[in-house]
Amino acid sequence: MTRGVIAVTGGASGIGLAVARAAAAAGYRLAVADRDRVALDAARTVLPEQTRFSALDVTDEARVEGWIAEASDADRLVGLVTAAGIAADVHVLETSAEQFRRILDVNVTGTFLCAKAAARRMRETGGGSIVTIASVSGVRGSKGRAAYGCSKAAVVNLTQVLAVDLAADAIRANAVCPGPVETPLVARVHTEQTRAHWLAHVPQRRYARPDEMAGAVLFLLDPAQSGFVTGVALPVDGGFAGAGLTAIGR
């Protein structure tokens, strides 16, 4: 007997894939969505055979609602993880309105649509847990993050609103706020200079592994471990969000 279905957006690579693998190991069924069909094909080789795979644009409301309905066909939907997202490292004066709108559409509107669709289904079946993937860039101002930082700050606030609005329906909502993580998205955005800058400001002096994010997400999904935790934005960032002046040369 499984523990129910966990639906994961952006689940074919990076943090989303790490979450899917951890959830499968913990006994959950999986519904994995991603817009990258090549990555989806690769994910099929490492995730359980019974996983439902879907190509999905999270900004398409009708498709999102259909995906959530399909995800909960085989078993009760108990969790949603919104790991789909896009990023940019661009100076504020070089950030175009088009780029700004696109990043907010995917990261904020996409999270909202998936959370709303999942919450409607969870409300009918006894509750559940929504875990959004935000960022430390959404809780502290960082260079080049005019669009991305704003989008992730909005995700944090949206998650808090979800926690308040859905508490009476036994639905919890929490955000995980990663620092730098070794993912394909980060590999595309972080230059060598950016990496060195992060390493100089993260007290643990390293990038995280995706599975280190998955552990935090699984904690927030499991009501036995976090049943009285909702509305939290949890930094998983090697100490970056809480750091002041760090040691020189160490």
Image (tube, grey):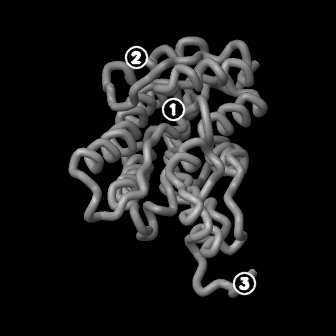
Give the left or right position of residue 76, taking residue 209 as reference: left
Amino acid under disc 1:
Thr
Residue visible at 37% across and 46% down in the picture: 165
Give the numbered dot on residue 249: 3
The vertical placement of 117 against 234, above or below, is above
Q: Label 2 crowding class (10 Å Cα cut-off): few <14, some 14-19, many 20+? A: few
Residue 79, picture quadrant: top right
**Disc assigned to residue 9:** 1
* Element type at mark 3: loop
Give the x, y percent position of residue 87.
43, 48
Disc 2: which residue = 66
Crowding at dot 1, Cα within 10 Å, few <14 / some 14-19 / many 20+, comes out as many
Q: CA distance from mark 2 to mark 1?
A: 14 Å
Spatial CA distance of label 3 from label 2 is: 52 Å
Residue type beneath disc 2: Gly
Residue at 45% in and 30% down: 118
